[in-house]
Image (tube, rainbow, N blue to C red):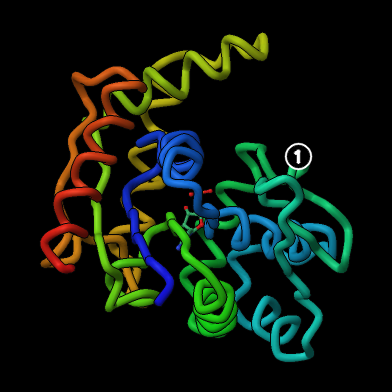
Amino acid sequence: MPLTIALDGPVGAGKSTVCDAVAKRLGILHLDTGAMYRAAALKVVREGISPEDAEAVCRLAEKGQIRVSVRYADDRQMTLLDGEDVSALIRTQEIGQAASAISRYPCIRKRMVALQQEIARSESMLLDGRDIGTVVLKDADVKIYLTSSVEVRAQRRLKQLREKGDQTPYEKVLGEVKARDEQDMTRETDPLRQAEDAVLVDSSSLTFDETVEVILDTIRKRHAGKE
Ligand code: DC
């Protein structure tokens, strides 16, 4: 039986990089489900559709024109849109915000959830996102909810921006993180929340390496308890 690990948490909790490191140490694949919503958002933006226009977004989805897929090369996820590798193009603030907006629509979630479940059926995987422990992999072997304070998450985001030479002020970054939390946690369909059986990991005062170790430890303990 493949091992399934579900890791959810809010924007800026460091899920992606932490999960890459954890999956590598466990020798399993990591599926960043946020990247799939981002690729779908890129399609919407490319079509000149507003992410706020639910009807137009769903029309596109229902016509089968949001073709997102995932491939692995050297154990690294490549996220494809219409067969094009868009992994780098989807890492912008604009696409993140658009992904958050379109991920509210059931017409989008239904397809993404089915695709993610299909990918996770094939082999042992660590999935990260917002609804993995509550919807996508309700029976996951281990569930983790990774978070940290909104201020710490905004500071981390600020650091990433500064490294790219972006001088957006802290208050604006903090406001954006709060707005994204609000949108992801209060939407009607599958909002971000901690699954009842998930272990909470608060990384506010942990370094990256410490966070990875705490998560590995949690997985070992939880998984051992089930064997
Ligand atoms: O993790 P991220 O910032 O790349 O995700 C982008 C958006 O996609 C996020 O704001 C909400 C949505 N998302 C979701 O609704 N469900 C998931 N499993 C993953 C992401």
Q: Which residue is painted at 33% across and 39% down in the image?
A: 178
Residue furthest to the bottom in view is 62
Q: Which residue is painted at 76% across and 50% down in the image?
A: 73
Q: Quadrant of residue 71?
A: bottom right
- What is the x, y in percent for residue 187? 34, 68
Q: Quadrant of the C terminus?
A: bottom left
Q: Quadrant of the N terminus?
A: bottom left
- What is the x, y in percent for residue 146? 27, 43
- What is the x, y in percent for residue 158? 47, 17
Dot 1: within a 10 Å radius of its alpha carbon, few (fewer than 14), some, or many (20 or more) residues?
Answer: few
Q: Which residue is painted at 80% across and 63% down in the image?
A: 81
Q: Which residue is painted at 53% across and 70% down in the image?
A: 123
State the residue in front, 73 or 6: 73
Q: Quadrant of residue 195?
A: bottom left
Q: Is residue 52 above or below residue 27?
A: below
Name the amino acid, label 1.
Answer: Ala
Q: Label 1, on which residue?
A: 88
